[in-house]
Amino acid sequence: MIKAIEGIITKKEPANLILKTAGGVSYGVAISLFCSAKLERGQSVELNITQIIREDADLLYGFLDSNEQKMFETLIKLSGIGAATAMAVCSSLNPNAFLNAVKSGDAAALQTVPGIGAKTARRIIAELSDAKMTMDENLPSHQHEAILALESLGFKREKITKALSECDAQNTGELIKQALKKLA
């Protein structure tokens, strides 16, 4: 399973690009319009990848933002929501706007996405309203890495966030050590 690709953008269209790796292999990757706006042809970039393998295709979806990727992966797990619709949501709503729409039951916000009508918007809200969805608020990378490391050790995100708010370390290793003392 492909999880990330690093390379140079050799061709870019609004919703997809071709990324050529150092090994000379070129990959076609679908991207959101938000992601597309941040990228230029000839730019070197690393994209987080969600790979979908179907009987007739092997598709790659690329993301600069881990929250956008999390939103996409959450959506494609819902019945009746395919990758194209999930990518349309990613192109129309940023992750925080999506999360707020779901939490507040704002079907009208979801209906601004091309291809999502009232019925689908209500179904998305119904299926996700009970789910504990969180987006990482533009955290510094060392805090994000510490959260992931502590979650892999079995700690709950709420407790991790509380512990990290009481820590002052500026690198991942020290931050994890301080948080572990508070979590123990």
Image: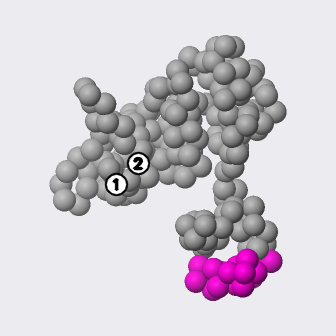
Q: Looking at the image, do the residues carrying marks 1 and 2 touch, with CB atoms under 8 Å apart?
A: yes
Q: Is residue 167 magenta?
A: yes
Crowd rating for badge 1 (residues with CA inside 10 Å; few <14, some 14–19, many 20+): some
Is 103 on the left or on the right of 60, as rendered? Answer: right
Q: Which residue is mark 1?
A: 5
Taking the spot 68% from the left edge, 45% from the top edge, the residue there is 133
Magenta highlight range = 166-184
Q: Is residue 119 visible?
A: yes
Q: Which residue is mark 2?
A: 49
Question: Compared to 70, does 88 lie above or below?
Answer: above
Q: Amino acid at mark 2?
A: Ile
Colour convention of the picture = one colour
Is 178 on the left or on the right of 89, as rendered? Answer: right
Is 119 on the left or on the right of 62, as rendered? Answer: right
Q: Is residue 45 visible?
A: no
Distance from disc 1 to disc 2, alpha carbons, whole Å, reads 7 Å
